[in-house]
Amino acid sequence: LAKTTQPISMDSYEGQEVNITCSHNNIATNDYITWYQQFPSQGPRFIIQGYKTKVTNEVASLFIPADRKSSTLSLPRVSLSDTAVYYCLVGDILLAGSYQLTFGKGTKLSVIP
Amino acid sequence: DSGVTQTPKHLITATGQRVTLRCSPRSGDLSVYWYQQSLDQGLQFLIQYYNGEERAKGNILERFSAQQFPDLHSELNLSSLELGDSALYFCASSGRTGENTQYFGPGTRLTVL
């Protein structure tokens, strides 16, 4: 599984756009990039997933450059409720058989009023 | 709501005891994964079952075991409990659409006294 590197923590004011970048230099051809959000004492929640270019859903956008060695999760106009830990994971989601997720430390986002 | 349910929400027990945690996957998902999250270790993959059969093992202790039943629900059995087993235990499921994006349950908080 490709190793990922992301900032340990970030602070943002309410209403701002937050961009969290994840590095994955050893990403493989079949790997997808997935982001999860976790609130204290709750299970990780799937946010967004992508393979290349840009993916957008009702919660976030995911930007992936052509070389796919990094990705950026963009949260528009954050609110206090977006304070959480955000995990970037890389893996072949279409691989038949086992696919355990390897979680790193994640990025602890703190939204300030 | 991810569609994955876990019971019980909280469990308090004593050292040396045995407990069983239960997980019901999302409707149609064939894979169930178990993860442990403690304060100092982060989220760690324990074991995966696919359609009733063990598919992958992670950092699961020999005192721990799991199974997946014909109705696809899964149980994680923890025996000879130690203080260090106190943690949040999450179940995740995947496989409804042929890919492995995992959806997590709310977790069971185990406290060993």
Image (tube, coloured by chain):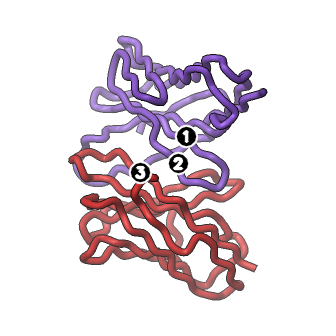
Chain colours: A purple, B red
Q: Is residue B99 left or right of residue B38?
A: left
In the rendering, at what x and y percent does residue B76 appear?
Answer: 46, 74
Asked if residue B90 is positioned above or below residue B96 in the image, the reply reads below
Helix, strand or loop for disc 1:
strand
Helix, strand or loop for disc 2:
loop
Q: Residues within 10 Å of mark 1 (few under 14, many from 20)?
A: many
Residue under numbered circle 3 = B103
Residues tagged by mark 2 and mark 1 found on one chain of the structure: yes
The three-letter amino acid code for the residue at tag 1 is Gln
In the rendering, at what x and y percent does residue B111 appear?
Answer: 69, 73
Tag 3 subunit: B
Nearer to us in this view, B4 or B46: B4
The three-letter amino acid code for the residue at tag 2 is Pro
The residue sitting at 47% across, 21% down in the picture is A71
Nearer to us in this view, B20 or B58: B20
Figure quadrant of residue B41: bottom right
Contact (CB < 8 A) between labels 3 and 1?
Answer: no
The three-letter amino acid code for the residue at tag 3 is Tyr
Residue under numbered circle 2 = A44
Q: Is residue A5 left or right of residue B71?
A: right
Tag 1 subunit: A
The quarter of the image holding the C terminus of chain B is: bottom right
Cα distance, mark 3 to mark 1? 11 Å
Asked if residue B69 is positioned above or below residue A56 in the image, the reply reads below
